[in-house]
Image (tube, rainbow, N blue to C red):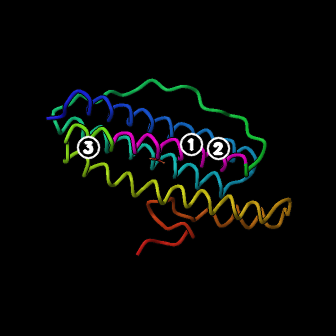
Amino acid sequence: MLSKKIESALNGQVAIEASSSQAYLAMASWAENQGLQGTAAFLYRHSDEERLHMLKLIKFINERGGCAVVPALKQPSTKYKGITDVFQALLDHETIVTNEINGVVDTCLKEKDYTTHNFMQWYVGEQIEEEALARTLIDKLNLIGNDKGGLYLFDRDLEGMQGAEGGNAKGGKKQ
Ligand code: FEO
């Protein structure tokens, strides 16, 4: 059975994963309107992954005798100065998510809830990969600069690139 503190911390994380999904959906839509089809496909997949992160939490809360709360969401940003701005916003968002996950893990230790602590380790590992992937993509964009040919290739590469769950920071498949 979950304590009220843990239930509340996990529901906070449900809201964060939901807001991540919503934010990346807005980024995907922006990219699609810019003609960046590969980037849009990558971000649509990323948005779907975040929804799965939320679902995983909802199911865990309910299975452990808590009550999962489906949150209301704020409208995410719809305007970006450019593609680097999108991925910088994504990295900034993931850095906040990592801090929040660390907070949940800390609460688990304080409450001596080792089952939830164990469950949260998946999210801890996921954050390392997501941040690494975002940093790699920003590095590539900085290298490309204003080179339109480079941007074309970047966008084409992202078409088939898996997110953090399906690949590593170099964009390859997990073994
Ligand atoms: Fe589910 Fe990107 O954190």
- Name the residue type under label 1: His
Mark 1: give few (<14), some (14-19) or many (20+) Cα within 10 Å: some
Image coordinates for residue 114, horizontal then vertical, percent: 20, 47
- Relative to 125, say whether 24 is above or below: above
Mark positioned earlier in the residue sequence (3 or 2)? 2
**Amino acid bearing label 2:** Ala
- Residue 97 is inside the magenta segment: yes
Q: Quadrant of residue 108?
A: top left
Q: Which residues are magenta?
A: 85-104
Q: Nearer the viewer, residue 158 or 2?
A: 2
Residue 63: mark in rendering: none
Relative placement, left or right, of 6 versus 86 is left
Tell whether 39 sits left or right of 66.
right
Quadrant in the picture for residue 54 = top left
Residue 164 lies left or right of residue 57; in this view the side is right
Q: Earlier in the sequence, mark 3 or mark 1?
A: 1
Q: Residue 121: x and y, percent? A: 32, 54
Q: Quadrant of the C terminus?
A: bottom left
Q: Tell me the distance, in whole angstroms, between the alpha carbons under discs 3 and 2.
A: 31 Å
Under 8 Å from ligand 1: the CB of mark 1?
A: yes
Q: Which quarter of the rendering shows the N terminus?
A: top left
- The answer to whether 99 is drawn above or below residue 67 in the figure is below
Residue wearing tag 1: 93
Q: Which residue in the protein does label 2 denote? A: 89
**Residue designated by label 3:** 109
Residue at 84%, 62% (x, y): give it: 148
Q: Label 1 vs label 2: CA separation?
A: 6 Å
